[in-house]
């Protein structure tokens, strides 16, 4: 039985990855950060009862990471933990960098010192590209990285330090550069679930309006389930390498909002307003990933479309808000 160690296991991606690895026969270990509301710390993974082991941990606690990795001796390590909200990274830049950049370095050091024969996956992000786009309007592995947020800057460091450790210490350490990926498990302060939940609240009569930020920014949205399959493929490639994971299609926040409200027989123009407090100090206007390398290497094909992803999220909130 293979053993996997996942940081951020109670997040959206961590929970779907846990399900996927358990379905493949893995034993899964993960860490969660302690907070004062324990009732919801494991809500995304509380249905799992077999071959799952959860411990308290933090990427800032190097000795704790080394102790856990020494005890578990995992075959695979997935670093999914992060301060993951880009807008909020402007409010807490130091915490974001300490977690997303130095936290990744701490885990790499613990990995190198305790289980160097394991394989290591770093969750990298399309936010690393910022507004840098190739002439054909795609971002790919070779596109220059010019991040536009503390989150993106920290992720660039984590991406590069992973490559550096791979080359310096002959480690099987890889990066998955994931473009936006959503699901019903996405936090409701992220724009997709904020729009879907807000629209259903309006439909049910529990809310009268919805405030958003930049309606004209474009994103490449996929489903987390499809993307965690890609993570596993990337990590288990016979050579350590870096891959973009994306659908290759881009839609604006306005298009997404219009689709969601229209599915509920609502006109978004009647309910949605723009609030400057949700705008970023430096906006990232356009993301569209070219995942040709991933598709050609692994024959990866996403099962969800933009529409079926949103339909699933709409149905989830219709069932849960009554």
Image (tube, rainbow, N blue to C red):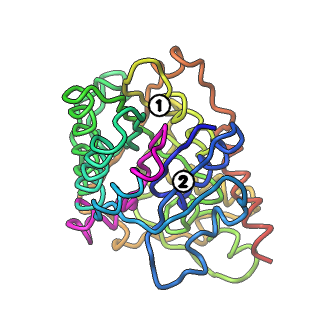
Which mark is drawn over residue 235? 1
Instruction: Name the secondary structure under disc 1.
Output: helix
Q: Residue at x 46, y 69 (%)?
A: 56
- The image quadrant where one finds the C terminus is bottom right
Residue 174 highlighted magenta (yes or no): no
Q: Quadrant of the N terminus?
A: top right
Q: CA distance from mark 1 to mark 2?
A: 17 Å
Placement of 169 over or under 179, stated as above or below: above
Which of the two residues, 77 or 291, is positioned nearer the viewer here?
77
Residue 230 position, x and y percent, is 54, 32
Q: Residue at x 41, y 38 (%)?
A: 121
**Residue span colored magenta:** 70-97
Q: Is residue 7 above or below residue 122?
A: below
Q: Is residue 100 above or below residue 167?
A: below
Does residue 100 appear to the left or right of 295 in the view shown?
left
Q: In the image, 156: left or right of 82?
A: left
**Residue 293 image-quadrant placement:** top left
Q: Is residue 80 shown in magenta?
A: yes
The local crowd at label 2, few if under 14, some if 14 to 19, many if 20 or more residues have their Cα within 10 Å, is many
Where is residue 246? Give x, y as percent.
50, 33
The percent position of residue 251, horizontal first and vertical second, equals 52, 42
Please name the residue shown 48% across and 22% down the image: 237
Tell me: 261 left or right of 188: right
Which element is circle 2 on? strand
User: Of 13 and 208, which appears nearest the observer?
Assistant: 13
Please indicate whether residue 313 sits to the left or right of residue 85 in the image. right
Residue sitting at 29 percent across and 47 percent down?
155
Instruction: Single out the residue that lies furthest toward the front.
Output: 71
Earlier in the chain: of badge 1 and badge 2, it is: 2
Name the residue tied to disc 2.
29
Depth check, front residue: 77 or 280: 77
């Amino acid at each position: 039985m293979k053993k996997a160690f996942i940081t951020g296991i109670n997040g959206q991606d961590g929970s779907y990855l846990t399900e996927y690895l358990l379905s493949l026969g893995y034993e899964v270990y993960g860490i969660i950060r302690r907070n004062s509301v324990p009732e919801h710390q494991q809500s995304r993974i509380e249905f799992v009862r077999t071959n799952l082991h959860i411990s308290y941990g933090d990427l800032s606690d190097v000795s704790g990471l080394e102790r856990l990795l020494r005890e578990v001796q995992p075959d695979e390590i997935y670093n999914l933990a992060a301060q993951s909200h880009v807008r909020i990274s402007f409010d807490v830049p130091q915490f974001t960098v300490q977690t997303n950049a130095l936290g990744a370095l701490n885990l790499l050091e613990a990995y190198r010192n305790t289980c160097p024969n394991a394989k290591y996956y770093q969750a990298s992000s399309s936010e690393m590209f910022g507004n840098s786009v190739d002439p054909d309007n795609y971002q790919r592995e070779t596109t220059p990285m010019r991040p536009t947020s503390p989150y993106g800057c920290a992720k660039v460091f984590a991406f590069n330090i992973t490559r550096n450790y791979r080359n310096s210490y002959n480690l099987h350490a890889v990066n998955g550069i994931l473009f936006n990926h959503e699901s019903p498990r996405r936090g409701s302060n992220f724009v997709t679930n904020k729009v879907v939940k807000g629209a259903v609240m309006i439909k049910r009569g529990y809310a009268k309006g919805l405030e958003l930020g930049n309606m004209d920014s474009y994103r490449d949205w996929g489903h987390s389930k499809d993307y965690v399959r890609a993570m596993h493929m990337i990590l288990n490639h016979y050579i350590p390498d870096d891959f973009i994971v994306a659908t290759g299609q881009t839609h604006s926040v306005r298009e997404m909002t219009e689709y969601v409200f229209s599915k509920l027989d609502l006109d978004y123009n009647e309910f949605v307003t723009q609030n400057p407090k949700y705008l970023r100090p430096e906006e990232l206007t356009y993301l569209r990933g070219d995942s040709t390398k991933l598709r050609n290497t692994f024959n990866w094909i996403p099962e969800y479309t933009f529409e079926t992803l949103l339909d699933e999220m709409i149905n989830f909130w219709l069932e849960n808000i009554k």
